[in-house]
Amino acid sequence: MTREAFEEHVSEALDLIPVELTRLMDNVAVFVEDEPPPEEPDLLGLYEGTPLTERGEWYAGALPDRIIVFMGPTLRMCETAEEVVEEVATTVVHEVAHHFGIDDARLHELGWG
């Protein structure tokens, strides 16, 4: 799969998030990178930043939070294009949830682990 196609799947996954939630997303950018850090070679996505639930007055002027979706491990774990689409959607929802302050334990409870 080309990087362009993968990026399109990430964009489509973002479009699946209800408008009511995307309107609340603040100061966050989404990126596709080829590979995760070497110490976490199987990492599919990463949220870097301060969740909305933890922001205060001090947050003004902060650089944007980052949601990163890693193409390499996603393509290696998926056997079909349909699996890639499904996994990208799960990864995007998972990382956006972190932006809203939802931790991994709660995501696993909700089936987005």
Image (spheres, rainbow, N blue to C red):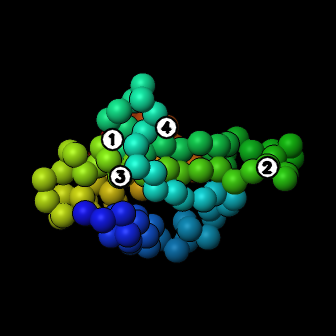
Q: CA distance from mark 3 to mark 1?
A: 18 Å
Type of amino acid under label 1: Gly
| The image quarter in which residue 16 lies | bottom left
Q: Nearer the viewer, residue 2 or 45?
A: 2
Helix or strand or loop: what does disc 3 sit on?
Answer: helix
Rendered-image quadrant of the C terminus:
top left
* N-terminal-most mark, 3 or 4: 3
Q: Residue furthest top?
A: 39
Is mark 4 in CB contact (under 8 Å) with mark 1? Answer: no
Helix or strand or loop: what does disc 1 sit on?
Answer: loop
Residue 71: which numbered mark, if any?
3
On screen, residue 12 versus residue 98, left or right, reads left
Whether residue 39 can be seen here: yes
| Marks 4, 2: nearer the viewer | 2
Q: Position of residue 74 (x, y in %)?
A: 29, 49
Classed neighbour count for the residue bearing mark 1: other residues with Cα under 10 Å, few (<14), some (14–19), many (≥20): few
Classed neighbour count for the residue bearing mark 2: other residues with Cα under 10 Å, few (<14), some (14–19), many (≥20): few
Q: Dot 2 corresponds to which residue?
A: 62
Residue 103: which numbered mark, if any?
4
Is mark 3 in CB contact (under 8 Å) with mark 1? Answer: no
Q: CA distance from mark 4 to mark 1?
A: 10 Å
Task: State the residue at coordinates (48%, 43%).
Answer: 46
Q: Dot 1 corresponds to which residue?
A: 113
* N-terminal-most mark, 2 or 3: 2
Type of amino acid under label 3: Met
On screen, residue 42 versus residue 63, left or right, reads left
Q: Position of residue 76 (x, y in %)?
A: 22, 46
* N-terminal-most mark, 4 or 1: 4
Type of amino acid under label 4: Asp
Q: How many marks?
A: 4
| Marks 3, 4: nearer the viewer | 3
